Image (cartoon, helix red, strand yellow):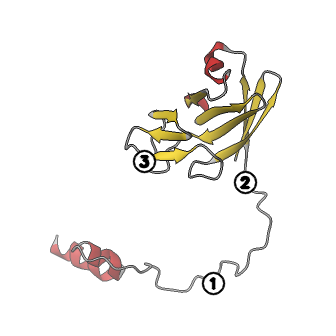
Amino acid sequence: MENKRRDFLKTACAPVALSMFGISVLEACSSGDDTSLPANDTSSSDDKTSTTATIDLSSSSFSSLSDIGGWKNYLEKDLLLLRISETEIRAFSNVCPHQGTQNKWSHGNGKFTCSQHGRSFDDGCSGSLICYTAKIEGETLTVTII
């Protein structure tokens, strides 16, 4: 057993070995230069895949969105939906940026609050919650999730 630990300590990078004893060191574990990465990658970011969620707003499941200020935690698609006006619904990721919780949201005073830890997030698209493009056509809401 002692030989295995000694062999590990010899081959492990110093920060990993030191962290076992409660000493933290900020350093990468790589012992060499990684020159295989391009210096300046100017290629377009077309490799992002997006999915689309299509929602029938006339469904009774989405009746909470019929009034301005109404909202819904749409767990099936991991979305928080908020009615802003007759022509706008905002769509956010329902994954809490702090704890990752998805099912403990409330909304009020322009903020979504995660009851897992009590942290609040603005309901504008410039806040901490990921905001997606949403478009209403008749009774159909289309959300593009990137």
* Image x and y of residue 69, in percent: 62, 29
Residue 65 vs 104, above or below: the answer is: above
| Label annotation for residue 124 | none
Query: Residue 104, how many percent across, how many down?
Result: 44, 34
- Inspect the image, locate mark 1, and give the three-letter code of the amino acid beneath it: Thr
Determine the CA span between mark 1 and mark 2: 25 Å
The numbered dot on residue 99 is: 3
Name the foreground residue: 83 vs 94.
Answer: 83
Question: Horizontal and vertical percent for residue 131?
Answer: 65, 46
Q: Quadrant of the N terminus?
A: bottom left
* Residue 8 seen from this side: no
Front-most of 10 and 29?
29
Kindly report which numbered mark, 2 or 3, lies closer to the viewer in this rendering.
Answer: 3
The span from disc 2 to disc 3 (Cα, nearest Å) is: 25 Å
**In the image, which disc is placed on residue 35?**
1
Left or right position of 47 against 110? right
In this view, the residue in front, 32 or 49, is 49
Q: Secondary structure at mark 2?
A: loop
Q: Mark 3 and mark 1: span between their CA atoms?
A: 36 Å
